[in-house]
Image (tube, grey):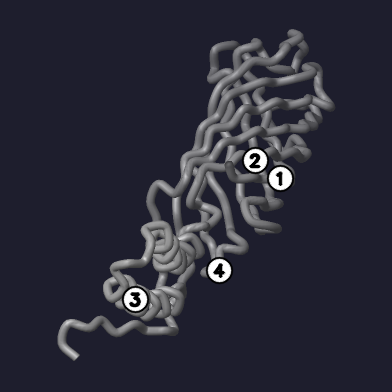
Amino acid sequence: MTGVRHYDQDEPGTLSVYRAVLLNASIYNFISQAPRVRLSRKFALLGLLLAPVVGAADAVTDQPWSTSAFSIETGVLWEVGSGTPLAYRLVPTQLSWRSAKVFGHEFDDGSILLVRHRITLLGTWIESGPETHYIAIDGSPSIEWWNKTGTWALVGGSGGGLGGLDSRGVKGGQGQDFTFNWFIRGGIEHVISPGRSLSAGIMYQHMSNGGQTKPNPGIDALGFALGYAWKY
């Protein structure tokens, strides 16, 4: 029929919208044919008219990447490089903020590949090594592939930052307090409830002062990280 839009009831969220259209027509006819209906009742009917459409929109847009989120992650990293003879062992704790989706691509199967901003406050306990702690600020993109239902994702990213530690002047240790860092991370994130998720993955971190001292042994550490994230 000309001028009438047909709805595919198999599309996500479309069934609710389809029913809402039918309901809207019935309510509109009732209101237009009953001019003496009290104003308060007309507003109540208007609320019924809009509620199914709003509910369907919320169901579609309430995804893990739709708003900003905080996360806290911790783990253990072991020295794997040849820059220092010392067997460093690091326990990093990361408090991170992730933005909503910046851009992405949705595939035909409904899954989505996207990028978010990620800023991290890093506090590392140097469990084994001459120094005791490292505090830094880092930035990186968060690259995420989510399945079509938004219940789990493959996540990763690479970035870096700068900070300070308590250098001791020990041979094989860090040459000064001011230190750069670079990292790469990857893992899996699983939604456990609306707005809440757990993660597990691997992390590599490099720390050095960029050649500002001679020698500049640096640290190259590899290990795992576990995390918890929440939307706000």
Task: Say what amino acid the circle numbered 3 marks.
Answer: Phe
Which numbered mark, 1 or 4, is in the foreground of this view? 4
The residue at the point 45 percent across, 73 percent down is 13
Q: Earlier in the sequence, mark 1 or mark 3?
A: 3
Mark 3: secondary structure: helix
Q: In the drawing, does residue 192 fall left or right of residue 45?
A: right
Q: In the drawing, does residue 54 fall left or right of residue 134?
A: left
Percent position of residue 158, x then y:
53, 41
Q: Earlier in the sequence, mark 1 or mark 4?
A: 4
Which numbered mark, 3 or 4, is in the foreground of this view? 3
- Tell which residue pokes out farthest to the top in this image: 169
Q: CA distance from mark 1 to mark 3?
A: 54 Å
Q: Quadrant of the N terminus?
A: bottom left
**In terms of image quadrants, where is residue 229?**
top right
Q: CA distance from mark 3 to mark 4?
A: 38 Å
The residue at the point 76 percent across, 40 percent down is 75
Q: Earlier in the sequence, mark 2 or mark 3?
A: 3
In the image, 139 versus 207, the foreground residue is: 139
Task: Say what amino acid the circle numbered 2 marks.
Answer: Ser
Which residue is tagged 2?
A: 71
Mark 2: secondary structure: strand
Q: Is residue 112 visible?
A: no
In the image, 94 versus 38, the foreground residue is: 38
Q: Is residue 200 visible?
A: yes
**Circles 1, 2 touching at the beta carbon (< 8 Å):** yes
Task: Say what amino acid the circle numbered 4 marks.
Answer: Thr
Percent position of residue 200, x then y:
71, 51
Which residue is tagged 4?
A: 149
Which numbered mark, 2 or 3, is in the foreground of this view? 3
**Other-residue count near label 2 (Cα within 10 Å), few / some / many at <14 / 14–19 / ≥20:** some
Which residue is tagged 1?
A: 227
